[in-house]
Every structure is written in C-alpha cells, then in structure tokens.
Amino acid sequence: MFNMQDQPFSFLQLTDVEIQPLEINIDSTPFDLSLEITKTEKDLIVSARYNTDIFEHITIRHMLEYYQVLLEAVVRNPTQLISTLPGLS
C-alpha cells in the first residue's frame, strides 16, 4: 500500500476542548508492505511497515534508498522520460 499525506494537518477547534494528534506506534500492518509519505514544509518523510516474515530490514532499507535516488533524479530533471530514470532501463 502507498499512502501520500500532502495536506497540511489542521487541528479541530472546539469550545473548551483541546485536541492534539497522537502518534501511535503500530507493530503490525494488514499489508505485506506499506509506505507512507508525509509532506512537510521542507521535506518528505517516508516510513515503511512490512511483514518481517517476508522482508528483511536490509531489503526495505535498500528499497527506500532506491526510492530516494528516483525522487532525486525526478527533482533534478522533471521532464526526463520515465525510461531514463536510474535503474528503470
């Protein structure tokens, strides 16, 4: 699963009630692999959840490093053909 959060986070405003986001640490995922990308003012934050029975940590790390290389190549030259991106030939 791929999830991109590119909308600014907004707080719900209620009278006499304060609501703040709560970060929840989830140790499992209903999918074998899920990537969540959150856009901030300056960065993209990428997190991965994966089935450890299928993937090793180093495999996911290499996958994320490769994803970073792809994103950097697109930013450097946004008009290039997809077939010319690194590793896609």
Image (tube, helix red, strand yellow):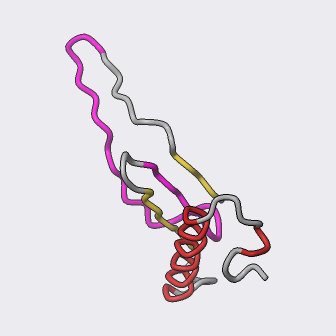
Total marks in image: 0
Q: Quadrant of residue 73?
A: bottom right
- The reply to whether the magenta stretch includes residue 63 is no
Q: Residue 44, position in %: x, y?
A: 44, 57
Residue 28, x across and y down, in percent: 51, 66
Report the residue at 70% width, 74% height from top: 85
Name the outermost residue toward the left.
16
- Judge by depth and name the residue closer to the eye, 46 or 25: 46
- Residue appearing at x 53%, y 69% in the figure: 72
Left or right? Give the position of 66 relative to 87. Answer: left
Above or below — where is 80 with respect to 14? below
The quadrant of the rendering that contains the N terminus is bottom right
Residue at image position (52%, 72%) is: 68
Report the side of 24 relative to 63 (left or right). Answer: left
> Magenta span covers which residues?
14-39
Name the dominant secondary structure of the magenta segment: loop
x and y percentages locating residue 30 in the rendered image: 61, 61
Res. 2 image quadrant: bottom right
| Image vertical order of residue 87 relative to residue 77, above or below | below
Identify which residue is drawn at 58% across, 72% down: 67
Is residue 31 highlighted in magenta?
Answer: yes
Identify which residue, 74 or 57, lies in the foreground. 74
Residue 41 higher or lower than 58, as above or below: above
Q: Between residues 44 and 54, which one lies in front from this camera angle? A: 44
